[in-house]
Image (cartoon, grey):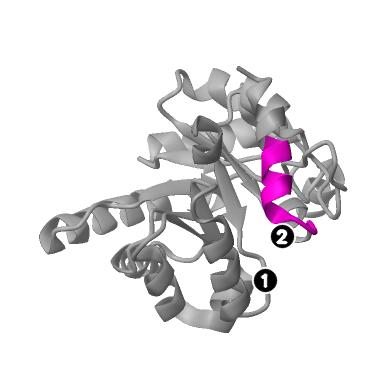
């Protein structure tokens, strides 16, 4: 199902066993699973390697450090067999370029596919006030577009951004080859929770998003498969 390929389920749960249960339940109904900081801290890299052996994994650790450190972390992420991982675009072009180059070299040398590498722009829990607190006076859309352009120029495969900025990213980076992965997606039946810049799945795809990261609306549903079917019904109206 085309709809299923577009969904990345966030494994934002407290234990590896809970995550395994979600994967077993939904593995034939979604395109990928996301392992973030909470689960990675609890379960560690061996859990990622285990799940990545049979499923596409987006490793969402948002690397942000000196170029050498991020490159070495990216190499180890690639060796775990993940499909995609990310880093903060605000780390700058040298950090991103170094990671892309060194990860690519190791993948070629060791004979496995390089994961997709994408840059985090502005978190979907942030708003204009959040940016002002850290000294960024430009608007969110402007800052996201600037970071997306920097990420593309640094050789990254795409970015993570709110669905509200997808159109601006497309205008800045040109064409559809540059991936846009969107968290902050809330189906019509779900609550917003702590997200501030959100959009429904149908609208996010119409804006041009490639993949939708969805966690709590699926994980917390009494019937997760039913929640997914309701999301797919929303997505199908975007075609």
Q: Label 2 to label 1, Cα distance in Å?
A: 8 Å
Q: Is residue 226 magenta?
A: yes
Magenta: main secondary structure equals helix
Residue 137 location, quadrant = top right
Q: Nearer the viewer, residue 239 or 183?
A: 239
Q: Identify the mark nearer the N-term, 2 or 1.
A: 1
Query: Which residue is painted at 78% across and 39% down in the image?
Result: 187
Residue range in magenta is 221-231
Q: Are marks 2 and 1 in contact (CB under 8 Å)?
A: yes
Q: Is residue 37 magenta?
A: no
- Regarding residue 26, the answer to whether it shows in the image is yes
Residue linked to disc 2: 219
- Regarding residue 123, the answer to whether it shows in the image is no
Where is 61 relative to 125, above or below? below
Tag 2 secondary structure: helix
Tag 1 secondary structure: loop
Mark on residue 13? 1
Q: Report the side of 84 relative to 18 (left or right).
A: left
Where is 232 relative to 95, above or below? above
Q: Report the side of 119 relative to 55 (left or right).
A: right
Q: Nearer the viewer, residue 232 or 12?
A: 232
**Mark nearer the viewer, 2 or 1:** 2
Where is 158 relative to 9, above or below? above
Query: Which residue is painted at 14% across and 64% down in the image?
Result: 110
Image location of residue 161, percent across then percent down: 63, 40
Residue 20 location, quadrant = bottom right
Image location of residue 88, percent across then percent down: 54, 54
């Amino acid at each position: 199902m085309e709809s299923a390929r577009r969904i990345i389920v966030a494994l934002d749960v407290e234990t590896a066993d809970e995550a395994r249960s979600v994967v077993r339940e939904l593995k034939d109904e979604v395109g990928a699973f996301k392992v973030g900081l909470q689960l990675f801290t609890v379960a560690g890299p061996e859990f990622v390697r285990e799940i990545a052996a049979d499923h596409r994994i987006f490793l969402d650790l948002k690397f942000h450090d000196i170029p050498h450190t991020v490159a070495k972390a990216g190499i180890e992420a690639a060796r775990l067999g993940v499909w995609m991982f990310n880093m903060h675009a605000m780390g700058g072009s040298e950090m991103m370029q170094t990671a892309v180059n060194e990860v690519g070299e190791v993948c070629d040398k060791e004979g496995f596919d390089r994961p997709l590498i994408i840059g985090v722009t502005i978190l979907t829990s942030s708003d204009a006030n959040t940016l002002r607190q850290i000294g960024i006076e430009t608007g969110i859309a402007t800052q996201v577009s600037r970071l997306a352009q920097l990420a593309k120029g640094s050789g990254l495969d795409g970015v993570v951004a709110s669905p509200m900025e997808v159109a601006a990213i497309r205008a800045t980076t040109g064409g559809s080859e540059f991936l846009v992965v969107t968290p902050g997606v809330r189906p019509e039946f779900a609550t917003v929770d702590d997200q501030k810049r959100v959009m429904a799945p149908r609208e996010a795809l119409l804006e041009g998003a490639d993949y939708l990261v969805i966690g709590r609306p699926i994980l917390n549903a009494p019937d997760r498969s039913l929640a997914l079917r309701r999301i797919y019904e929303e997505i199908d109206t975007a075609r």
